[in-house]
Amino acid sequence: MVKVGVLALQGAVREHIRSVEECGAEGIAIKKIEQLKEVDGLILPGGESTAMRRLIDKYGFMDALKEFAAEGKPMFGTCAGLILLAKNLVGNEPHIGVMDITVERNSFGRQVDSFEADLAIKDVADNFPAVFIRAPHIVEAGAEVEILAKHNDRIVAAREGQFLGCSFHPELTDQHDLTAYFVEMVKEVKAKQFA
Ligand code: GLN
């Protein structure tokens, strides 16, 4: 069974673990740097990216997260996690900065902080109930990035090799297709390591 970690410094951790387990993988809340060695893939959850960044620095996680990416292990950033993965941020310095996308925060208007939309996500689902909470969006994607979903002409889900990112909260619904897609990415990478 593959092991999928969920960075547990802040944000929606428990729901992601439940979703990972629904997909037949083991979910592990990552609270210490050493635990990263135990997992085959990592989810960076939603929450608040500046708060999460502060905790990443406080507990010295940044180098270990960059190393995890450099080892080719799959990473899935959801909402604030997408912001952490992006190589470029509008108006801000990047955080982990590994996925070739430009992301803008809080993109969907102040008055509609939170909403649900049915999305068609390529290779995942025709109708995915996506929950957006003060969500970012992908303004620009590099040549190697595959766009998986758009909402109102804005990119809200994408993949670049080992990296998967989305603007919304896939863990807040009972439909686990997107988590299952990530678990498959993790299985593929792990299978190659032992091939
Ligand atoms: N707006 C938040 C941020 O900038 C992200 C919101 C979320 O993760 N639900 O970090």
Image: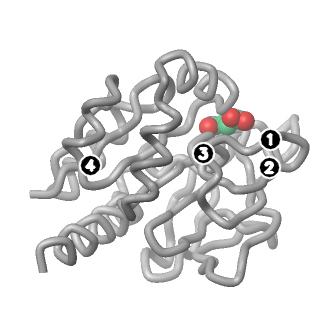
Q: Which residue is mark 2?
A: 89
Q: Is residue 15 left or right of residue 137?
A: left
Circles 3, 2 touching at the beta carbon (< 8 Å): no
Q: Nearer the viewer, mark 1 or mark 2?
A: 1
The answer to whether residue 116 of the structure is visible from this angle is no
Residue drawn 25% across and 75% down? 188
Q: Looking at numbered disc 1 in the image, what kind of residue is underneath it? A: Glu
Query: In which image quadrant can residue 165 be found?
Result: bottom right
Query: In which image quadrant can residue 6 be found?
Result: top left
Label at residue 4: 4
Tag 1 secondary structure: loop
Q: Which residue is mark 3?
A: 96
Q: Looking at numbered disc 2 in the image, what kind of residue is underneath it? A: Leu
Residue drawn 36% across and 41% down? 16
Q: Is residue 66 above or below residue 145?
A: above
Residue 189: give x, y in percent of width and height: 27, 71
The answer for how far apart the CA atoms under marks 1 and 2 are is 6 Å
The answer for how far apart the CA atoms under marks 3 and 1 are is 10 Å
Q: Is residue 106 above or below residue 118?
A: above
Circles 1, 4 touching at the beta carbon (< 8 Å): no
